[in-house]
Image (spheres, rainbow, N blue to C red):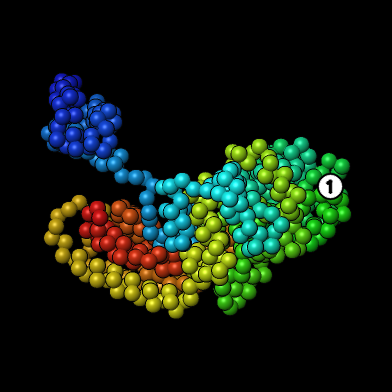
Amino acid sequence: MSMTDSDTKTLLRSIPAMDELLNAPWAAEFSGSLGRENVKKIIEEALGEIRREINGGTTASMPMDELVASRAATLLRLKLSSTLKPVVNATGVIIHTNLGRAPLAPEALAAVNEISGTYSTLEYDPEKGGRGGRNVHVEWLLRRLTGAEAALVVNNNAAAVLLALSATAAGREVIVSSGELVEIGDSFRIPEILAFSGAKMIAVGCTNSTRIKDYGDAITENTAVLLKVHPSNYRIEGFVKTTAREELAELAAERGLVFMEDLGSGLLGSLGVGGPLGAALASRECSVRECLEAGSGVVTFSGDKLLGGPQIGVIAGSKKLIDRMKSHQLLRALRVDKMTLAAFEATLRLHLSGKQGRIPVIGMIETDKPVLLERARRLCRLLKQSATCNTDFSRQVPCAVKPGAGDFTIAVVETEDAIGGGSFPTDLLPGFGVAISSPSFSAEILAAGLRAATIPVIPAIREGRVILHLRTLLPGDEKLIAASFTSAIRGEAV
Ligand SMILES: *Cc1c(COP(=O)(O)O)cnc(C)c1O
């Protein structure tokens, strides 16, 4: 239906005045938590939207004051809820970068809780009655766990690499294999970090083959570092020749250079994964201690990958080199805060006392198939109940998922889970999940319904089915999944 100019004008004029809107009970309710000025800004946003629609020829489907109230209240409610909130990770990817990587162990949470709301010894030594260092809280633990002479923590592993290179190679050359010029996550690129550190990158060898001679031939009087980078998130198959760290360590020692290694995931001990997979993982992933023993002068790694702690970066290695980093100006900009330190210390103590199984990432990696099967059967029963309870769609609510009155196929299926976070990109962990499908709606629509819950459930989608992987679920998640499934098929918000 087309509107005449005068219709448009009449509609625009029927928009209530701001004062009137601000004083309406629905708006006043939000002022308490958002503040009147912010409520006004958000109402203006809603009015702008409505004016644009009217000018574009849209006729109002309800009385103007109701339309304004409903649009503004929707925007206001969005602003009331956090955008940073918990989700249920049912993707089967354990270290999921977009979902916050490693969930913390209960001990780490308790430590954060204890330290954050009070003053602390962050940089204070009660014995001396004066200034202390924030690094001391974790250095001894890191030395014990890795065998390193010294250790230093910063914001994340990208910062660790940046600081380590800045302190050892600024203005000089760093030799790295062409096969290791990797991009990790969506922004960590070795060539760019090298450039930021002020070092000059000398790439040697080919993508799939770099020999010790390639490094040796590239050394000049201006070379400072031989750098080895864990290719984390990809693997080259076929003819591959990389140089052993022992050879690199020897070459570096002979020529008076630093041998530095960016390990990425920071495996502290062996992972308790049995069978051929465990053997494959162990043969491919070197622990921090093994790398240092093989001659790496400095290694860098993340705290929130295989270590299972908070976001932090660790530099471990020779005391002489770490001392240079400790006194580098850049450290001031990259230092970690007290909450992170508290969580990290508690996580390291779990490693030290042999209780790594309490760390969610490690517990998830080590969960056996029979345990996952049992949990999958339980979740399957729960979801079948939810589906049948809701076959009576007497409530006429707008429905995201068109209800097909019980025509869901819900079944336990085998899954391939992943460690993620760039750790072991091609080694998948066999697990179990629950698959949901229905002839009356697509997997994408059901997944969107699950994500719309107050605590969004993030499933995987495979071959037209929604798959809920059991391995990455935390205690209590099954109930949240059942609730979000119920509301998805009813088309309500939880
Ligand atoms: C993950 C990773 C990084 C980046 O670490 P952040 O902790 O995300 O900063 C750097 N290098 C390697 C090899 C990695 O695997």
Q: Residue 83 at what x, y percent from top left?
A: 36, 45
Q: Residue 487 at what x, y percent from top left?
A: 24, 58
Q: Which of the image's four quarters has the C terminus?
A: bottom left
In the picture shown, does residue 123 fall above or below 472?
above
Q: Residue at x 56, y 73 (%)?
A: 273
Indicate left or right for 217 with 73 as reference: right
Q: Residue at x 69, y 62 (%)?
A: 147
> On the image, numbered disc 1 is attached to which residue?
218
Q: Residue 57 at what x, y percent from top left?
A: 23, 29
Q: Nearer the viewer, residue 72 or 22?
A: 22
The image quadrant of residue 485 is bottom left
Q: Residue 18 at what x, y percent from top left?
A: 19, 25
Is residue 6 in view?
A: yes
Q: Which of the image's four quarters has the N terminus?
A: top left
Q: Residue at x 69, y 44 (%)?
A: 325
Q: Nearer the viewer, residue 396 or 158?
A: 158
Label 1: few (<14), some or many (≥20) within 10 Å?
some
Classify mark 1: helix, strand or loop.
Answer: helix
Is residue 177 in view?
A: no
Indicate left or right for 469 with 319 as reference: left
- Amino acid type for the residue under numbered disc 1: Ala
Q: Residue at x 35, y 58 (%)?
A: 457
In the picture shown, does residue 354 fall above or below 314?
below
Q: Nearer the viewer, residue 295 or 184?
A: 295
Q: Nearer the viewer, residue 141 or 165?
A: 141
Q: Is mark 1 within 8 Å of ligand 1?
A: no
